[in-house]
Each structure stands twice: as structure tokens, then as C-alpha cells.
Image (cartoon, rainbow, N blue to C red):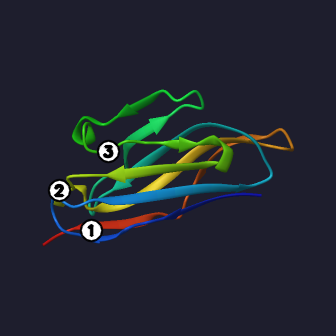
Amino acid sequence: QVQLVESGGGLVQPGGSLRLSCAASGTICNINAMGWYRQAPGKQRELVTAITSGGSANYADSVKGRFIIPRDNAKNTVYLPMNSLKPEDTAVYYCNAGISTALGASSIYWGQGTRVTVSS
């Protein structure tokens, strides 16, 4: 069984910073791409950023220059340091990853989500 557990959400003022973490655990053989999505109230879930196992990353235009996606393969963990936060960054943030298990199956897994609120 594989789990993705996120942490680090909360309330922050505009212009502030937060760092999200997502750790994968379970009978993991290999983790391919990992990413962060977000869903704001009344909107569809959207891709924020993703990174391959080799370290290539892509970012939504709305977060370029403010967010990065460091990844620690040894810890099966991906992070989302967020700087210069804006009210429009308010959303539930979800981690996802493509994971192959020891049984040979490969699936996309999602975390439970962590809420980020940017407000004064």
C-alpha cells in the first residue's frame, strides 16, 4: 500500500512564504514524476508544478519565479516552497506521484490535500 502525506499548509499574509512537503511511503519500487496541483473554491484542479525523477521541472505561468519544486529521491519526498504569496494562491494543494510498487503495478497516487490561505 502506498500513501502520500502532505504537510505545511496554513494561513499566511500576502507577500509571505510557506513550504509544503509531501512524503511517499509504502511498498515503493520506483517513483517517476511528482507534482503539485491546487484547487481553489469554485474552480477546477490545476497543475502548479511537476518534476521528473531526473530533476526536470515545469511550472504554471502563474507561479513561475515564486514557487520551486525541490525533490529528495532518497526520502521519497517532494517540497513546494512558495514565496511572494498572493490571495489568488489560496487553494487546497494536492501532491501526486507516479509510483511503481514492489508488486510491479504502476499507478498515480494522490495526497489528501493541504489548505493554503493567503489573506490579510
Q: Residue furthest right?
A: 103
Q: Give the mark nearer the N terminus: 3 vs 2.
A: 3
* Residue marked by disc 2: 86
Residue type, label 2:
Lys
Q: Give the structural element (helix, strand or loop) at label 2.
A: loop
Relative image position of residue 107 (x, y in whole percent)? 68, 42
Q: Nearer the viewer, mark 1 or mark 3?
A: 3
- Out of 19 and 95, give the one closest to the viewer: 19
Work out which quarter of the rendered image holds the N terminus and state it. bottom right
Q: Quadrant of residue 105?
A: top right
Relative image position of residue 26 (x, y in whole percent)? 76, 56
Report how far apart the C-alphas of labels 1 and 2 lie in the structure.
9 Å
From the viewer's perspective, is residue 82 above or below residue 120?
A: above
31 left or right of 44?
Answer: right
Assess disc 1: are there few (<14), some (14-19) or many (≥20) residues with their C-alpha within 10 Å of its C-alpha. Answer: many
Residue at 48%, 43% in the rendered image: 35
Q: Which mark is residue 67?
A: 3
* Residue marked by disc 1: 117
Residue at 53%, 64% in the rendered image: 112
Work out which quarter of the rendered image holds the C terminus and state it. bottom left
Q: Give the structural element (helix, strand or loop) at label 1.
A: strand
From the viewer's perspective, is residue 112 above or below residue 52?
A: below
Q: Are marks 3 and 2 in contact (CB under 8 Å)?
A: no
Report how far apart the C-alphas of labels 1 and 3 lie in the structure.
16 Å
Residue at 24%, 56% in the rendered image: 89
Residue type, label 1:
Thr
Q: Which mark is residue 73?
A: none
Assess disc 2: are there few (<14), some (14-19) or many (≥20) residues with their C-alpha within 10 Å of its C-alpha. Answer: some
Residue at 39%, 31% in the rendered image: 58
